[in-house]
């Protein structure tokens, strides 16, 4: 079984600072994918970034990067130069290749302070 | 543009009634999923389908059913609604043709069972 743990229920960060959202996972699978989704107050789920278990380089998408440490089973999301619009709920999730269902963590509520 | 839609967006029903939530996607994706979101639990998988006539139970499937008669639709039925099924329901879809297994989410349905 897969498990995702997000230990930060809430975070407050000053605008323009970088922020790291923690995610650890547990799985016995060798091939898997790790995802981060953003959920603003409007409720929709927005895909941010993806990392495959065999990818040697950390994934990056604009201001988002995923700090993937396979041996430690962590997949932290780093947001550089935070903006007010980054205030939202952030979910870490994983799936097994060939079995596409996602297992989600409980989320981290990020609030950006002007 | 391709999209995934859910209807209704809001629903109030009484305990014991049968309720069906609709999900329709125009991505031509084989994989479709239903999740529920509750405070403190993140998103949990209810049912999923990898193609027409294929359905599978997820983590929290008791009291729910799905059917897949075509590629575009995966309706979720609550056989006899219970107050514990008050939640926000998300439908999602993904392709199995690409390496990136990103799931595209619908806007969600807020269901209240009184």
Image (tube, helix red, strand yellow):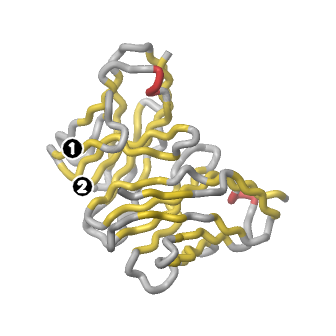
- Name the spot of residue B93 as percent of width and height, x first: 34, 52
Q: Is residue B82 above or below residue A30?
A: above
Which residue is situated farthest in the bottom direction here?
A56
Quadrant for the N terminus of chain B, please. bottom left
Instruction: Point out which mark residue B55 bears.
Output: 1
The chain that hosts pointer 2 is B
- Name the spot of residue A29 as percent of width and height, x first: 33, 68
Q: Is residue B40 above or below residue B97?
A: above
Residue hosting label 2: B30
Q: Is residue B83 above or below residue A64?
A: above
Q: Is residue B114 visible?
A: yes
Q: Residue at x 32, y 44 (%)?
A: B58
Q: Residue at x 55, y 74 (%)?
A: A66
Residues tagged by mark 1 and mark 2 found on one chain of the structure? yes
Instruction: Point out which mark residue A112 bears.
Output: none
Question: Does dot 1 land on a helix, a strand or a loop?
Answer: strand
The chain that hosts pointer 1 is B
Q: Residue at x 38, y 45 (%)?
A: B45
- Name the spot of residue A19 as percent of width and height, x first: 71, 68
Mark 1 or mark 2, earlier in chain: 2
Q: Residue at x 32, y 31 (%)?
A: B62
Question: Does dot 2 land on a helix, a strand or a loop?
Answer: loop
């Amino acid at each position: 079984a897969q498990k995702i743990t997000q230990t930060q229920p809430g975070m407050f960060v000053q605008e323009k600072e970088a922020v790291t959202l923690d995610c650890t996972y547990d799985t016995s699978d060798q091939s898997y994918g790790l995802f981060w989704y953003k959920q603003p107050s409007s409720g929709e789920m927005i895909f941010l970034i993806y990392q495959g278990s065999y990818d040697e380089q950390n994934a990056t998408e604009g201001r988002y990067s995923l700090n993937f440490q396979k041996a430690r089973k962590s997949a932290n999301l780093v947001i550089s130069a935070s903006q007010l619009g980054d205030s939202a709920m952030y979910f870490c999730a994983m799936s097994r290749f060939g079995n596409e269902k996602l297992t989600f963590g409980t989320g981290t509520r990020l609030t950006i302070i002007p | 543009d391709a999209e995934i839609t859910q209807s209704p967006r809001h629903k109030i029903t009484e305990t014991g009634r049968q309720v069906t939530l609709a999900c329709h996607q125009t991505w031509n994706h084989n994989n479709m999923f239903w999740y529920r979101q509750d405070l403190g639990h993140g998103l949990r998988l209810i049912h999923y389908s990898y193609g027409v006539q294929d359905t599978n139970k997820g983590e929290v499937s008791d009291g729910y059913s799905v059917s897949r008669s075509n590629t575009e639709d995966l309706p979720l039925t609550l056989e006899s609604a219970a107050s514990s099924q008050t939640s926000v329901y998300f439908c999602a879809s993904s392709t199995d043709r690409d390496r990136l297994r990103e799931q595209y989410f619908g806007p969600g349905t807020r269901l209240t069972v009184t």
